[in-house]
Amino acid sequence: MADTETTGSVDYLAKDGRAYITLNQPAKKNAMTDAMWDQLMLAYGQAEADDDVRVIVLTGAGTDFCTGHDMSEVGNQYGETTLDAKGRPRRPSQRARLQYDTKYVARFERIFTCLTPSLALVRGYCLGGGLYLAEACDLVIASETAKMGHPEQKLGLSGAAYFDAWEMMTLGIRKARELLLMAEIWDAEKAHSAGLINKLVPDDELLARGEEWAERIVRLPRDGIVIGKSATLVAMNSLGINKQFSYGPVYHALASNMRWEADEVNFFKQKRDKGVSAANKEREARYDVKADGETAGDK
């Protein structure tokens, strides 16, 4: 899969019973463009169709795993803005939102339900859609540099997530709500103790420990691997976890069409008027709350 400077790439290599899938846009901390998401789906399809592949190893190029969706695309993913009869910008329809969001959430479901087990090797930032990718994998080994969280909640989602059910089951309801509503970035130790990570290792040992776990899976019988994953999915379905992929597109379509009040920070408006970097700074200042309740934006 060809690399490009504008869209990044998802690179694929199959050998020794493994499919190595690498998110490759390190200049943007492996933020995912729509083109990369499409390549990722092709890579998973290729791995699952290959009878010699018994485990998928998902990694990010450089020093980070993935920071979610490329922010340069966020806000205009529903298509070009149309004008009404008076020449004013018209919001995308709920139809357009649901159509896009259904496809977007299906990508995480594809990884979650893949019959070939996935092992995520995480270092550095693992945020937003990047954290969903890790959560969709069967196993996660992370280095001590890992930073995990949902800062995208500050865009207006305010506690809703594609992996709500999984996070509540994994973290418990209180910690899951904390992860989302506070929109904090947890360090590796906190993420590990909460259950987001299976194994925490020194950064220079990450790949080696990943190879050890991958080899243990590769030595299992092919049929056994598929039967085991299928049984796991049935169990999760009986717990209702898989329903998160049904409600995800609906809540996101609603959240992306919310009304912003005058005293609130609308990232999308600021992005349009000032650019991504300035909008991010203003958003972070808004939520940088000190112990006395004052924010950086108050000064």
Image (cartoon, grey):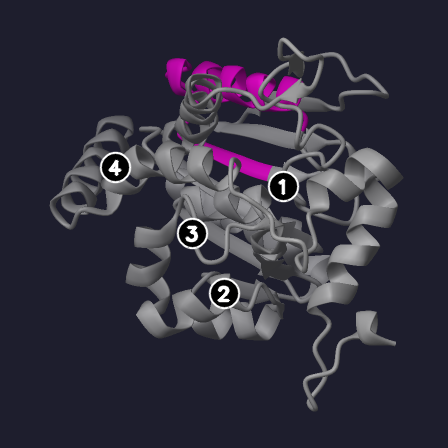
**Whether residue 206 is situated above or below residue 290 in the rendered picture:** above
Dot 1 amino acid type = Gly
Return the x and y of residue 93 as percentages of the image width and height.
48, 20
Identified at 61% across, 67% down, the residue is: 184
Q: Which mark is residue 23?
A: none
Residue type beneath disc 3: Ala
Marks 1, 3: nearer the viewer: 3
Whichever of labels 1 and 2 marks the residue nearer the N terminus, that label is 1
230 relative position to 141: left or right: left
Secondary element at tag 1 = loop
120 up-or-down from 167: above or below: above
Quarter of the image for residue 107 reads top left
Q: Earlier in the sequence, mark 1 or mark 4?
A: 1
Closest to the observer: 148 or 94? 94
Report if the CB atoms under discs 3 and 2 are less than 8 Å apart: no
- Neighbor class of circle 2 (other Cα within 10 Å; few <14, some 14-19, many 20+) is some
Q: Residues within 10 Å of mark 1 (few under 14, many from 20)?
A: many
Residue 14 picture location, percent across and down:
56, 21
Cα distance in 3D space between marks 1 and 3: 16 Å
Q: Give the number of the disc on residue 160.
A: 3
Residue found 75% across the figure and 61% down from its top:
284
Label 4, residues with CA under 10 Å away: few <14, some 14-19, many ≥20: some
N-term mark: 4 or 2 = 2
- The numbered mark, 3 or 4, whose residue comes first in the sequence reads 3
Q: Secondary structure at mark 4?
A: helix
Circle 1 is placed at which residue position?
Answer: 68
Front-lying residue, 70 or 63: 70
Residue 294 showing in the rendered view: yes
